[in-house]
Image (cartoon, helix red, strand yellow):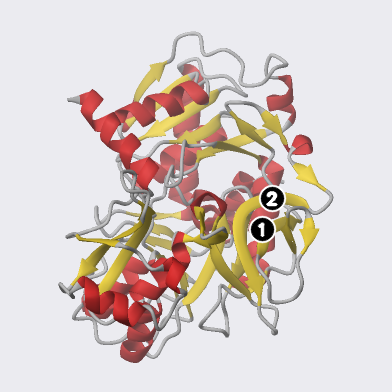
């Protein structure tokens, strides 16, 4: 079984059901039309010389054409490598090289054959082919260089089934999809289509009462900024929503409470990991990312030792749908798993009810006063202060002191320190504050860290 067979089944059962309603272009496609157009593109790719098992990048604006192209690439037997249009040129070129692309498909059927891509593994692509390759997604680069994650067809189906045990998406659902398709295909768009739901891409939080009245969305899927925008929009009610999923970055308490106060709906914070899929979702506890999906076994370790209840450790995962391999360099699944599964790089603790409380990323951990501290801890405290909308903590490269960028009203640094001292330890207090209009983010909304910002500036300089 693969994702294409699941989508075809939906087209056979309900051919007239709307598969995608693209609010930006105004184009709607039924399941029958989506399957037909994807198959037509697959035949065209094959006539152009594309062969089963080759790798094809997809670089075009999001929407109906993007989805048809993605499914057409898979239908032709190619491995799909989506590339966001907002990715800087230097990073885009790195993805093309790291994925060893044979082809690149752009808008208006602009298909480019790449010169002599070479194998992606050390066995002339034999290991790659054995994975039944379907999809390579590169990480956002928010905390370092982008890594390529390979998923085979069976892995994709496993992930979808694991997530939908809890999400329970079916053909009656209408999904307000507010994230980039290029980054959220597998346990998002593909899951929805595999169940016969209607996908409604619209990243504008102020779509308006007309959109809500006409579509009656039952599920929304977006980043925290999207929900902040909804809370500030003229939209007065979202009564049709049964599930409000927030992902990509930590959900601030002010955003969650503001949304709930206005719409009477709880935002369900979720933890999605590219190497794993949808790992947890918060259904009843506003301070956590919820309990693990039933299919997954989570263990917290500190230096390969189990941590006691309530203490912080790195998340290790066992279960279905784990990545088949990293690419560039090639590292297959068997070399990545230890006794407790895959090390995710995320640090967390469990509360007494078994809910997971995220602390931060391993790459965002810094030693202060000999004790490990996560930038996310400092940011969470800063974001709780009146007048501060969002923040980014970092180590100032010149002075080597803790620093923070702040978005919001110009509160004096002395008042910030006074209020912050009531929330976190003295050693974690930033010594340098910078007020900025906005924080640097990746294309899918993740906060860019200091080293990544420096790399981005270098990239932009090299393109001028």
Return the residue nearer the eye: 212 or 13.
Answer: 212
Residue at the (66%, 80%) spot, across then down: 351
**Residue shown at the point (27%, 79%) measured from the top left:** 231
Q: Say which residue label 1 marks.
A: 314
Percent position (x, y) of residue 415?
24, 79
Decide: is 212 above or below 68.
below
Could you tell me if residue 149 is visible in this image? yes
Pick whichever, 37 or 288, lies toward us: 288
Q: How many marks?
A: 2
In the picture, the disc for residue 234 is: none
Q: Which residue is mark 2?
A: 343
Q: Please tell me whether mark 2 sits on a helix, a strand or a loop.
A: strand
The answer to whether marks 2 and 1 mark residues whose Cβ atoms lie closer than 8 Å is yes
Above or below for 136 versus 164: above
Q: Nearer the viewer, residue 81 or 376?
A: 376
Decide if residue 61 is on the left or right side of residue 50: left
Q: Going by the image, does 53 lie left or right of 306? A: left
Instruction: Kindly identify the residue that appears in the image at 23 percent across and 66 percent down.
Output: 407
**Which of pointers 2 and 1 indicates the residue nearer the eye?**
1
View extreme (right): residue: 339
In space, the residues marked 2 and 1 are separated at their CA atoms by 7 Å
Q: Nearer the viewer, residue 271 or 339?
A: 339
Where is residue 453 drawn, in percent x and y?
Answer: 32, 43
Q: Residues within 10 Å of mark 2 (few under 14, many from 20)?
A: some
Q: Position of residue 270 (x, y in %)?
A: 53, 68
Nearer the N terminus, badge 2 or badge 1?
Answer: 1
């Amino acid at each position: 079984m693969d994702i294409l067979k699941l989508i075809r089944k939906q087209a056979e059962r309900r051919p007239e059901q709307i598969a995608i309603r693209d609010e930006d272009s105004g184009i709607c496609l039924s399941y029958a039309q989506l399957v037909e157009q994807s198959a037509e593109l697959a035949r065209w790719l094959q006539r152009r010389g594309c062969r089963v098992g080759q790798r094809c990048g997809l670089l075009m604006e999001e929407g109906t054409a993007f989805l048809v192209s993605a499914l057409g690439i898979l239908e032709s037997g190619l491995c799909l490598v989506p590339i966001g249009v907002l990715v800087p040129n230097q990073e885009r070129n790195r993805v093309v090289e790291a994925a060893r692309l044979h082809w690149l498909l752009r808008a208006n059927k602009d298909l480019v054959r790449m010169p002599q891509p070479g194998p992606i593994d050390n066995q002339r692509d034999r290991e790659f082919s054995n994975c039944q390759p379907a999809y390579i997604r590169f990480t956002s680069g928010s905390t370092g260089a982008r890594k390529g994650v390979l998923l085979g067809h069976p892995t994709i189906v496993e992930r979808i089934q694991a997530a939908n045990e809890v999400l329970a998406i079916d053909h009656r659902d209408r999904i307000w999809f507010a994230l980039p398709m290029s980054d959220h295909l597998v346990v998002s768009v593909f899951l929805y289509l595999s169940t016969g739901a209607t996908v409604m891409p619209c990243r504008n939080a102020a779509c308006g009462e007309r959109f809500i009245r006409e579509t009656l969305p039952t599920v929304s899927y977006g980043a925290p900024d999207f929900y902040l925008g909804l809370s500030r929009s003229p939209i007065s009610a979202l009564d049709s929503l049964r599930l409000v999923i927030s992902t990509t970055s930590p959900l601030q308490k002010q955003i969650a409470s503001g949304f709930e106060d206005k719409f009477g709906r709880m935002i369900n914070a979720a933890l999605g990991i590219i190497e794993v899929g949808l790992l947890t979702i918060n259904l009843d506890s506003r301070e956590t990312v919820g309990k693990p999906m039933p299919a997954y076994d989570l263990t917290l370790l500190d230096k390969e030792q189990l941590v006691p209840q309530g203490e912080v450790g790195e998340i290790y995962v066992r279960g279905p749908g784990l990545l088949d391999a990293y690419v560039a360099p090639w590292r297959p699944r068997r070399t990545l798993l230890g006794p407790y599964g895959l090390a995710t790089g995320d640090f967390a603790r469990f509360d007494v009810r078994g809910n997971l409380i995220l602390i931060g990323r391993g790459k965002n951990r810094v030693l202060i006063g000999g004790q490990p501290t996560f930038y996310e801890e400092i940011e969470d405290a800063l974001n709780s202060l009146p007048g501060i909308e969002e923040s980014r903590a970092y180590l100032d490269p010149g002075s080597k002191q803790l620093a923070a960028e702040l978005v919001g009203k110009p509160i004096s640094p002395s008042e910030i320190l006074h209020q912050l001292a009531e929330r976190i330890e003295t050693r974690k207090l930033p010594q340098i504050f910078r007020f900025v209009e906005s924080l640097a983010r990746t294309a899918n909304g993740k906060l860019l860290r200091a080293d990544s910002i420096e790399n981005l500036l270098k990239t932009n300089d090299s393109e001028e």
